[in-house]
Image (cartoon, rainbow, N blue to C red):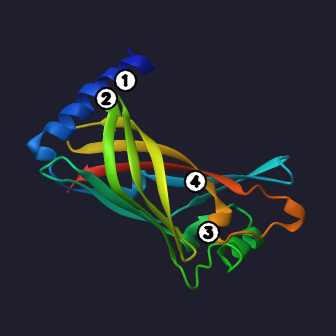
Amino acid sequence: MSQSSSDRGSSNQTGVSTLIANDASVGRWVLDPESSRVEFHIKHFWGAITVHGSFSKVSGEGSISSSRAITGQLVVDAASLTTKNKKRDAHLRSADFFDVDHHPHVVMTVTDAKHIDPATLTCQGTLEAAGHVRPIAFSVDVKEVADQAVTLRAELAIDRTEFDMTWSPLGMASKMARAIVVARFVRS
């Protein structure tokens, strides 16, 4: 029998509370790259189409301190991006966008995460891309809690102009990009 989404939320509430409170959770957690993904979506041609992309190489880690402070970092290999269009991908890797020759990584650092409801964390930190670092705040949905693993999902709206990614002939591409991160961390 499958659980309803409300049942899963209750399970996560107990699981997240237990996970954070449990002394065994204190310490280092490592990203499972095979079970994690980073995607981006951006409206193009004045909103008529959406360009979908992803990054194939991602790493990271998190930690829970003895005071139950939660921190972490997600590192994305910017050159691993793909939109399944070689010419567009080469342009996205160029200085007009990610500038991978000079800035090979996109780094999301979480300096503070707090459990705020049955299956949600609120996070603050920084996002670094193309040589620019900006503060960021976002919510994370806790999708799965197990003894030695936790799966998190976040959806972020990112203003690409804050990272000097302003190329857009005739204003065809939206300034706002939507990023979806699914990160599975395992106890190390």
Residue linked to disc 1: 8
Choose top left, top right, bottom left or bottom right for residue 142: top left
- Point out which mark residue 19 bears: none
Q: Which comes sooner in the sequence, label 4 or label 3?
A: 4
Judging from the image, what secondary structure is the residue with disc 3 in?
helix
Q: CA distance from mark 3 to mark 1?
A: 37 Å
User: Which residue, given by chain and number where applicable, does mark 3 sit on?
Assistant: 163
Asked if the residue at tag 2 contacts the one at tag 1, i.e. Cβ–Cβ closer than 8 Å, the answer is yes
35 left or right, relative to 100: left
**Residue type, label 2:** Asn
x then y, percent, for residue 42? 71, 53
Disc 4: which residue: 39
Question: Mark 2, residues whose alpha carbon is within 10 Å: few (<14), some, or many (≥20)?
Answer: many
- Which residue is farthest top? 1
Which residue is disc 2 drawn over?
12
Is label 1 in a helix, a strand or a loop?
A: helix
At x 65%, y 75%, the residue is 93
Residue type pointed to by label 4 = Glu
- Give coordinates of residue 101: x percent, y percent: 58, 85
Judging depth in this view, the residue of 185 and 27 nearest the camera is 27
